[in-house]
Image (cartoon, rainbow, N blue to C red):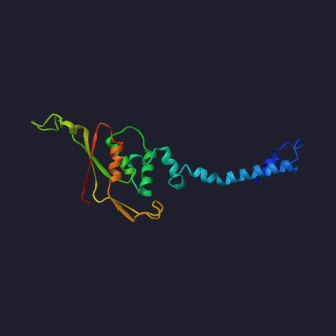
Amino acid sequence: MPHADLLAALLPPRSYDAAGPHVAASLTMEGRELDRVQADAAQAVGGLRPFTWQQWIEGYERVYGLPGPCAKAGQLWQERLALLAVALRERGGISLAWLKRYAALAGYEVDISEFRPFRAGHSRPGDALTSGDWLYAFLVVAEAGAYRAFRAGQSVAGEALRTWGDSLLECIVNWRKPAHTVALVAYREA
């Protein structure tokens, strides 16, 4: 049922004549606008799912301050979606396990290890008590030759079929690591 008919049904029966020229014009105009809003409602609700309705990604990037320091010229659509996924799921305190999950959200499987100070029962006599500034460093190890492949639904026309390099991973790790630490990124042979 068109909204103009629904609005006419809401009028008091004796006070207004829905068929009157001025009332009918007003009901028609307002009814058409409500019909249009109802038709567009599915797209508005789609804004709650940015990975399905990707026309909303610019709005999400604005709200989350993306792409942030990891921006680069010619950033792939897939990389933009990865950064948005990371921003949407970001939770809780910073730990090495959290940073590893954070990298996984962006599509990188990494191992993270720390440089440990002297510990009774684990270190040998004669070992240094601290490792100096290495106490504040950690190592992120990723697969060598990591690449991003063009994927239907996640990439757009004009992007390269495959790109190499992990500048996005290094940026994500350095952007989200604790401020007092140093992240070292290394790559192992595949």
Q: Is 35 left, or right, of 26 in this rendering?
A: left
Instruction: Give above or below for 159 relative to 177.
Output: below
The part of the image, by quadrant, that contains residue 14 is top right
Residue lying farthest right?
14
**Along the line of sight, which residue is nearer the eye, 149 or 76?**
76
Q: Is 96 left, or right, of 73 in this rendering?
A: left
Could you tell me residue 54's position as x and y percent?
Answer: 52, 55
Residue sitting at 33 percent across and 43 percent down? Answer: 97
Residue lying farthest front?
73
The answer to whether one can see residue 100 in this image is no
The answer to whether one can see residue 33 in this image is yes
Residue lying farthest left?
126
Could you tell me residue 154's position as x and y percent?
Answer: 46, 59
Which quadrant, please, contains the N terminus? bottom right
Instruction: Give above or below for 162 relative to 179.
Output: below
Could you tell me residue 188's position as x and y percent?
Answer: 24, 56
Residue sitting at 43 percent across and 57 percent down? Answer: 78
Residue sitting at 37 percent across and 51 percent down? Answer: 104
Which quadrant, please, contains the C terminus? bottom left
Could you tell me residue 16's position as x and y percent?
Answer: 87, 44
User: How many tags in the picture?
Assistant: 0
Q: Is 41 left, or right, of 183 in this rendering?
A: right
